[in-house]
Image (spheres, grey):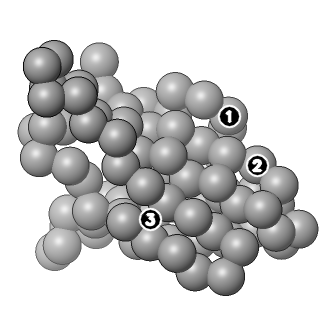
């Protein structure tokens, strides 16, 4: 989904279950921020931080993309239940 400097963001989907997660890994020392589009599989369900921690996600009202910040040398996995 995105590669910007030390931040790598990718989507994993399971066709049989319809589950989808967004994985973001920051190998740098400083915080990194990126806009990430929500996968269709999420629909209107609330997005949860399934792994790691970080600031609350902010959804852009116009684009529907989420502003995702990952601390240095950390990872986040986002999904829905």
Q: Earlier in the sequence, mark 1 or mark 3?
A: 1
Which residue is drawn at the image coordinates 88% and 68% (left, top)?
29
| Position in image of residue 45 (x %, y %) | 19, 31
Q: Which mark is residue 13?
A: none
The answer to whether mark 2 and mark 1 are in CB contact below 8 A is yes
Q: Secondary structure at mark 2?
A: strand
Q: Secondary structure at mark 1?
A: loop
Q: Secondary structure at mark 3?
A: strand
Q: Which mark is residue 52?
A: 1
Q: Which residue is mark 3?
A: 67
Which residue is drawn at the image coordinates 83% and 55% (left, top)?
73
Q: Which residue is mark 2?
A: 74
Would residue 2 appear left or right of 43 to someone viewing this image? right
Would residue 25 appear left or right of 31 to someone viewing this image? left
Residue 67, by quadrant, is: bottom left
Disc 1 from disc 3: Cα separation: 16 Å
Instruction: Identify the residue at the far right of this view.
Output: 29
């Amino acid at each position: 989904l995105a590669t910007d400097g030390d931040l790598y963001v990718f989507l994993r989907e399971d066709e049989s279950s319809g589950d989808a997660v967004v994985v973001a890994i920051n190998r740098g020392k400083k915080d990194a921020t990126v806009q990430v589009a929500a996968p269709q599989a999420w629909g209107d369900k609330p997005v949860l931080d399934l792994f790691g921690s970080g600031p609350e996600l902010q959804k852009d009202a116009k684009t529907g993309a989420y502003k995702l910040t990952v601390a240095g040398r950390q990872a986040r996995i986002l999904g829905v239940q």
